[in-house]
Image (tube, rainbow, N blue to C red):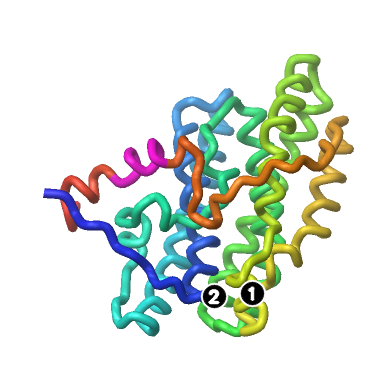
């Protein structure tokens, strides 16, 4: 027997929180894949701890999303149900975070990109009209600052390092940068959240993000790629071919052993 899937409310505030919670959750899954595989022991521990930070953020945000879901539909989902029992099209993370683990250069650049985004977003969410979300942001912003700083140090170290490390960083920039455009595209969910004071529009973070990431890449001796027409659409539930494999692994135990307790 397997557990049936759940379908969250389409209300804007629920969807806004799912985007945030899913971004943290799916990146945490990718970072967890480094456990036992990082290039040095210290990074093995650091990446795993950052994964746990992101799981904690995801749990808090998904719990709040489940409570808001109850206001709309009368059904309150907990964080485990929202994490493990949705269909692929109901996940709202940007495609950037679901891409395969890649090498260490790929990982630290993605961490820098997402860490910078989350830091800027958590800073704004501290003044959210939702008091519970504001409280979550007050704790999460400290973790995001560390994630950005840690990843940024590695981006500079590798980009300004050996020929091999610099080549790997250039390759990572070429692959990852086109996915950044999706992070700042607005839709009706963003508009409703901004109007209600729940949180900023995605586009509100673009200028500061580009400035901080541009400075980081310049220090690393790397160039910001020219804009491309390519657009990913993970926030709309249209995911890459990698997402299904990630969810199959992530959801297996909960699906196979419904409500299992340890």
Does the magenta stretch mainly form a helix, a strand or a loop? helix
Q: Is residue 261 visible?
A: no
Q: Is residue 96 left or right of residue 63?
A: right
Q: Dot 1: what SS?
A: loop
Q: Is residue 164 left or right of residue 4?
A: right
Which mark is on residue 64? none
Q: Which residues are magenta?
A: 244-251
Q: Is residue 170 visible?
A: yes
- In percent of width and height, residue 193 lies at 61, 77
In the image, 51 versus 73, the foreground residue is 73
Single out the mark in the foreground, 1 or 2.
Answer: 1
- In percent of width and height, residue 147 lies at 64, 49
Q: Residue furthest front?
A: 229
The residue to which callout 1 is attached is 199
**Does 196 appear in magenta?**
no
The reply to whether callout 1 and callout 2 are in contact (CB within 8 Å) is yes
Q: Dot 2: what SS?
A: helix
**Does 249 appear in magenta?**
yes
Residue at x 47%, y 76% (from the top left corner): 11
Figure quadrant of residue 117: bottom right
- In percent of width and height, residue 179 lies at 66, 43
In the image, 240 versus 208, the foreground residue is 240
Examine the rendered structure and indicate whether residue 49 appears above or below residue 121. Answer: above
């Amino acid at each position: 027997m397997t557990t049936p899937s759940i379908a969250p409310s389409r209300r804007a505030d629920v969807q806004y929180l799912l985007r945030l919670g899913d971004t943290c959750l799916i990146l945490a899954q990718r970072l967890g894949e480094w456990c036992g595989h990082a290039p040095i022991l210290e990074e093995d521990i650091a990446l795993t701890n950052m994964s746990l930070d992101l799981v904690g953020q995801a749990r808090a945000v998904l719990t709040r999303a489940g409570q808001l879901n109850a206001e709309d539909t009368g059904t309150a989902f907990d964080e485990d149900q929202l994490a493990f029992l949705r269909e692929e099209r109901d996940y709202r993370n940007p495609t950037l975070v679901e891409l395969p683990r890649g090498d260490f250069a790929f990982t630290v650049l993605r961490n820098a990109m997402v860490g910078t985004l989350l830091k800027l977003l958590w800073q704004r969410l501290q003044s959210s009209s939702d008091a519970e979300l504001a409280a979550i942001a007050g704790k999460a912003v400290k973790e995001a600052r560390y994630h950005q700083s840690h990843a940024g140090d590695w981006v500079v170290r590798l980009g300004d390092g050996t020929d091999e490390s610099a080549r790997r960083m250039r390759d990572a920039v070429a692959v990852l940068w086109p996915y950044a455009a999706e992070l700042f595209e607005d839709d009706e969910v963003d508009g409703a959240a901004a109007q209600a004071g729940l949180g900023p529009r995605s586009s509100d973070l673009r200028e500061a993000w580009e400035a901080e990431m541009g400075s980081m890449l310049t220090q690393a001796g790397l160039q910001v790629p020219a804009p491309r027409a390519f657009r990913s659409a993970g926030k709309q539930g249209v995911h890459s071919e990698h997402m299904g494999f990630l969810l199959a692994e992530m959801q297996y135990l909960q699906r196979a052993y419904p409500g299992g307790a340890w």
